[in-house]
Image: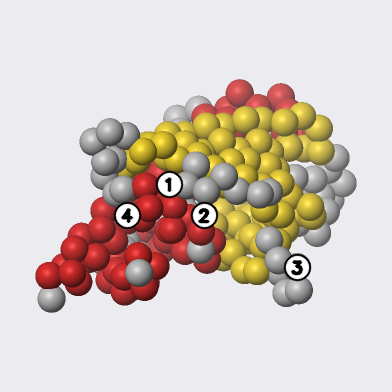
Amino acid sequence: MIRSRMSRAFAVARVHAPSRGSADRRARRPPSSRPLPLSSRGLSGAKYLGGVSNGARTVMAGWVDNTAEVTVTAPLPVVWELWQDKARIPNWMPWIHSVEPVPGVPGDTKWLLKTNQFGQDFEFSWVARDLPPVKKEKIHWFSTDGLNNKGAVTFDQRPDGRTVVRMNISYEVPDILVPFGAALSPLVASILQADLERFGTFSSKVVAAMGAGKRR
């Protein structure tokens, strides 16, 4: 029942969501420390699209961790269902261009990230494999191809009906960017925090649309 009501409410919330262009511009805004753009391990999971490249092969070394948290007004069942359909994620994470299932491999999804930093366009892709979820508590994954990463999103319902959403991601960076890790991490942290705050707004619209549907 909640899934069918949410499908209708999701359509309403999506219509009123910010355009990808405006959201992308907010996600692309770098902090004053001006960190270098994200990169990848030089495999098929990354694609350089602009600027000047020296053609050097990059080798991954070192992991960076980032965590973000938000308390949303939506109840846990709604929050949980929104995160189950990964194709919805670009609605609140605009730097994620698309999430598509891998044909014939249940639990695997192909992710495409597009970002512009300092006048340079980059694409990153990876295949993520879901680990067994803890229902209404935790989803987590690790990459099997492309950009090397792993992470989790956890959910905690508060007594007042609101839901705490926490996201933790770990990702490997190239050797050449290791000296800039102190600048890279705040950039990604700010993007993740903005993503979760955007999710809070989006989930509130879904709840409002569900309430409007019940009153009809």
Task: Check disc 3 and give the amino acid type.
Answer: Val
Placement of 210 over or under 33, stated as above or below = below
Mark 4 or mark 1, earlier in chain: 1
Q: Residue at x 71, y 46 (%)?
A: 142
Question: Circle 4 sits in a helix, a strand or a loop, which is it?
Answer: helix
Mark 1 or mark 2, earlier in chain: 2
Q: Residues within 10 Å of mark 4 (few under 14, many from 20)?
A: many
x and y percent of residue 44 in the render?
A: 80, 59
- Name the outermost residue toward the left: 215
Estimate the spatial distance between the alpha carbons at disc 4 and disc 1, rounded to whole Å: 12 Å
Q: Which residue is mark 1?
A: 195
x and y percent of residue 52 in the render?
A: 71, 51
Task: Check disc 4 and give the amino acid type.
Answer: Ser
Task: Check disc 1 and give the amino acid type.
Answer: Asp
Mark 3 or mark 4, earlier in chain: 3
Q: Which residue is mark 4?
A: 203
